[in-house]
Image: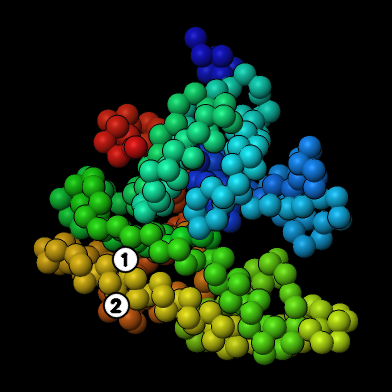
């Protein structure tokens, strides 16, 4: 008997290995872990100082002996050692630190990654003590996680706006009729805010502050009630700490280029869909998921540009992991969809 199952741990795991966050689903327990995809090393790489939430707190604040690293860039592994250690840590944590567990793992990946990048994800998971690794396109997993009946002969469209990539897919009969992964998403929004604050306010800010501004002020269409907040950072020329006031209109302008790229990619997808499936999408609309789906009024902006119904998934951050979790319990569909 499998030791993990004998201990009641439910060995199998579904993982959304994201550029910004990693989300882990365990059958029978649901989402068991959602943490930032960050690893903090000593500068000599002889010791891991922290992983996940604790490591993210160190971003921009580490002493000279510690460096915080994001192992993934644009949805794929950029630092193999860091990715392996992070995966191993998350697997152990999901199984309550059991050293005996060698789970079967399903991982969501962007549709457009190369065979070399796919192999890198598999190898990192195997080195992190997975017994077997399956890869599934993030858009497919997200569609399943939002409750779409993807095996029916009707068209479904999902737009998954993550940290490193935006995955756009039209799905019918359990397959991808159209898929595209655009390497523009939440991280580019943060970078746009950092650049805007420097150019327009002469203020240097870090990633964590930019993310806070995005969550608090960011929007894709005008807000009903304007918001203004104070932002603290370092003055570019004077080199001293200072505070400036920023409003939602400024941040909307800062994010406009990134949002426009995603909207154009969605419109391009709609132009390439077969006419019969276009009719289905007119009826069913577009499902928006991923962390970027929580940008205020993103659904309204897409609705205005496409003239289609747009709904935000109930659990946008967890959709990929939830969908991959469904596949854990459906071997036939897993065999059909997984690489």
Q: Which of 57 and 66 is in front in this view?
A: 66
Cα separation, mark 1 vs mark 2, equals 10 Å
Q: State the SS at label 1.
A: strand
Residue 310, image x and y in percent?
A: 34, 70
Q: State the SS at label 2.
A: helix
Labelled pair 1, 2 in contact (Cβ < 8 Å)? yes
Label 2 sits on residue: 306
Q: In this view, does 146 lie above or below 333?
A: below
Task: Say whether residue 100 is left or right of residue 157.
Answer: right
Quadrant of res 207? bottom right
Give the mark, 1 or 2, whose residue is nearer the N terminus.
Answer: 1
Label 1 sits on residue: 286
Question: Residue 86: which disc?
Answer: none
Taking the view exactly as shown, the residue that stands out farthest to the top is: 1
Q: Is residue 210 above or below residue 78?
A: below
Q: Is residue 235 above or below residue 267?
A: below
């Amino acid at each position: 008997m499998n030791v993990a199952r004998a201990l009641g741990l439910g060995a199998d795991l579904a993982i959304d290995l994201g550029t910004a966050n990693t989300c882990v689903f365990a059958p029978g327990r649901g989402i068991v872990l959602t943490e930032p995809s960050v690893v903090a090393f000593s500068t000599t790489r002889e010791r891991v100082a922290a992983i996940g939430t604790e490591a993210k707190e160190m971003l921009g604040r580490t002493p000279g002996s510690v460096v915080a690293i994001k192992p993934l860039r644009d949805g794929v592994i950029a630092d193999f050692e860091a990715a392996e250690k992070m995966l191993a840590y998350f697997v152990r944590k999901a199984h309550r630190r059991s050293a005996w567990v060698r789970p079967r793992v399903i991982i969501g990946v962007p549709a457009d990654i190369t065979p070399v990048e796919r192999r890198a994800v598999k190898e990192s998971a195997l080195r992190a003590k997975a017994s077997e690794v399956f890869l599934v396109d993030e858009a497919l997993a997200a569609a399943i996680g939002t409750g779409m009946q993807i095996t029916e002969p009707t068209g479904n469209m999902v737009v998954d706006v993550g940290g490193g990539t935006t995955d756009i897919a039209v799905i019918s009969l359990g397959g991808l009729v159209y898929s595209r992964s655009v390497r523009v998403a939440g991280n580019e929004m943060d970078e746009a805010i950092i650049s805007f604050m420097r150019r327009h306010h002469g203020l240097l800010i870090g990633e964590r502050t930019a993310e806070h501004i995005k969550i608090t002020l960011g929007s894709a269409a005008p807000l009903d009630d304007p918001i203004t907040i104070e932002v603290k950072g370092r003055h570019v020329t004077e080199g001293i700490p200072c505070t400036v006031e920023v409003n939602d209109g400024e941040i909307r302008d800062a994010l406009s280029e990134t949002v426009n790229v995603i909207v154009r990619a969605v419109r391009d997808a709609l132009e390439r869909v077969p006419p019969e499936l276009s009719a289905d999408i007119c009826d069913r609309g577009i499902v928006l998921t991923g962390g970027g789906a929580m940008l205020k009024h993103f659904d309204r902006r897409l609705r205005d540009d496409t003239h289609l119904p747009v709904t935000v998934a109930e659990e946008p951050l967890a959709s990929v992991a939830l969908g991959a979790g469904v596949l854990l319990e459906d071997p036939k569909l897993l065999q059909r969809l997984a690489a």
